[in-house]
Amino acid sequence: AQKVTQAQTEISVVEKEDVTLDCVYETRDTTYYLFWYKQPPSGELVFLIRRNSFDEQNEISGRYSWNFQKSTSSFNFTITASQVVDSAVYFCALGPLYGNKLVFGAGTILRVKS
Amino acid sequence: EAQVTQNPRYLITVTGKKLTVTCSQNMNHEYMSWYRQDPGLGLRQIYYSMNVEVTDKGDVPEGYKVSRKEKRNFPLILESPSPNQTSLYFCASSLSRLAGGTQETQYFGPGTRLLVL
């Protein structure tokens, strides 16, 4: 069975702090995709990144970076110099290589205070 | 503009009164799916559709029906809503694995908040 665990239910930081959101997954598949989505207070789901299991290179996009470690089944997300606009719920999700179903973690609420 | 739309965005209803939440996408995606979001549980898949007239159950299908008569539309039907179906519902679409070969990114609608009294 596939499972995604986001152990941090809620994180509070002060603006400009760096923050890392943890994601640990379980799957028997040898190849798969991992995703991060952002859900701001307005409620919509915003796609952030898709990473396939072939590629363990870390990725950086502006203040966002992702650390994928297959050995520990983790796909952590770091926001550098956090801003109030980063306040949202962040979801990590796992999907098969061939197929469309996504399994989501419970989400992490990030609160960035000014 | 490429998008997934849902209607209504907010709905309050009473137990047993049939309702339909519509979902439409303009990206010619084969794959569409419904999820519900509940606190502490993340999003869970209700039903999905690989293409027109092809639907299948997700993880939590009880109490829901779907249909896919047209490629762009994928309505979610609650024949007899109950309070435990109070939730935030999302429709999503993506290219099918049959077309893309590998999982494509799913794009989500804005969500429908449902309260069943």
Image (cartoon, grey):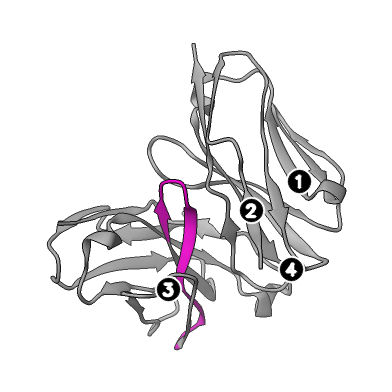
Q: Looking at the image, can residue B113 be seen?
A: yes
The kind of secondary structure the magenta stretch mainly shows is strand
Q: Residues within 10 Å of mark 2 (few under 14, many from 20)?
A: many
**Which chain letter goes with mark 2?**
A
The residue indicated by pointer 2 is A4
Q: Position of residue A76 (x, y in %)?
A: 72, 39
Q: Looking at the image, can residue B2 be seen?
A: no
Mark found first going from the N terminus, 1 or 4? 1
The residue indicated by pointer 3 is B72
Point 52% across, 57% down: residue: B107
Q: Nearer the viewer, residue A36 or B98?
A: A36
Extent of the magenta region: B36-53
Residue B89 image-quadrant placement: bottom left
Per the rendering, the mark at residue A97 is 4
The answer to whether marks 3 and 4 mark residues whose Cβ atoms lie closer than 8 Å is no
Q: Position of residue B34 (x, y in %)?
A: 43, 66
Per the rendering, the mark at residue B80 is none
Q: Position of residue A99 (x, y in %)?
A: 66, 73
- Name the residue type under label 2: Val
Per the rendering, the mark at residue A74 is 1
- Name the residue type under label 4: Leu
